[in-house]
Amino acid sequence: MKLYYFPESPNSSKVHAVAVHLNLSLELHFVDITQGASHTPEFLELNPTGRTPVLQDGDFVLWEATAIMQYLASQVPNTLYPGDRQIRADIARWQSWQLAHWYPACQTLTYENCLKGLLQRGAPDPQVVQTATARFHQEAIILDRHLAKQEYLVGTGLTLADFSVTGDLVYAVPGQFPLEEYPHIWAWYARIAALPDWQQTAPKL
Ligand SMILES: N[C@@H](CCC(=O)N[C@@H](CS)C(=O)NCC(=O)O)C(=O)O
């Protein structure tokens, strides 16, 4: 299987981490999105949205990190994505929340407080940061309360849900996420970030 990816992006690194965790061998293809490499005619044939990551398994091409993680985890029996219907639904719940609510909350802070400067697009907009911070708190409270009760998002062990939701915390420090009030999120993130597969694949900040 081939993975077209941009290693500095959590969307790519979380997919890569799952493959490493499951001992699945992937042929890695670096796509330099900073140089427009995800908008070439060849790449758009693979993914018309012009985004990474993309998985290619023979004739089957799959984009969207969450779908790719589920596909990879469906290749071999494992505890990241157990067969039990309710556990899978619970994982889907957190992955859906991540896509719909957590990612947008984190992404705006990452962009305003970190990427904008790196891309030389000016200073953070205080109004946007204020609105994004309020939105971040709204979601972080839910996550922190949940993690006060259990070590991992679903059941008692590590699952795809943890890889999905922690991905957005990779830029927590440069993105100045207001995480001081959320000790359970920090402790959980530290546990995931210490995993050898995460260490091997996480963006090098
Ligand atoms: N919802 C997509 C988001 C993918 C995405 O936004 N990828 C970014 C990197 S973080 C990208 O490749 N952007 C290139 C571009 O938009 O030109 C997923 O989960 O895979």
Image (cartoon, rainbow, N blue to C red):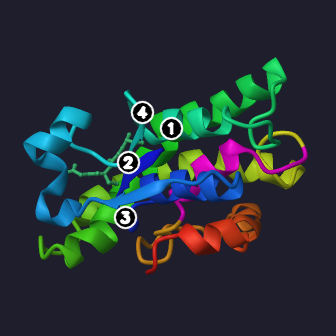
Neighbour tally class for label 2: few under 14, some 14-19, many 20 plus, Cα within 10 Å: many
Q: Amino acid at mark 4?
A: Gly
Distance Cα–Cα, label 1 vs label 2: 8 Å
Residue indicated by mark 1:
68
How many labels sit on residues?
A: 4
Disc 1 versus disc 3: nearer the observer: 1
The image quadrant that residue 57 belongs to is top left
Residue indicated by mark 3:
110
Residue indicated by mark 2:
53
Q: Quadrant of the C terminus?
A: bottom left
* Residue 4 located left or right of residue 165: left
Sequence order check: which comes first, mark 2 or mark 3? Answer: 2
Tags 1 and 2 in contact by the CB under 8 Å rule? yes
Distance Cα–Cα, label 2 vs label 3: 19 Å
Q: Is residue 160 part of the magenta span, yes or no?
A: yes
Disc 1 versus disc 4: nearer the observer: 4
Q: Residue at x 51, y 53 (%)?
A: 26
- Counting from the top left corner in percent of width and height, residue 160 is at 67, 43
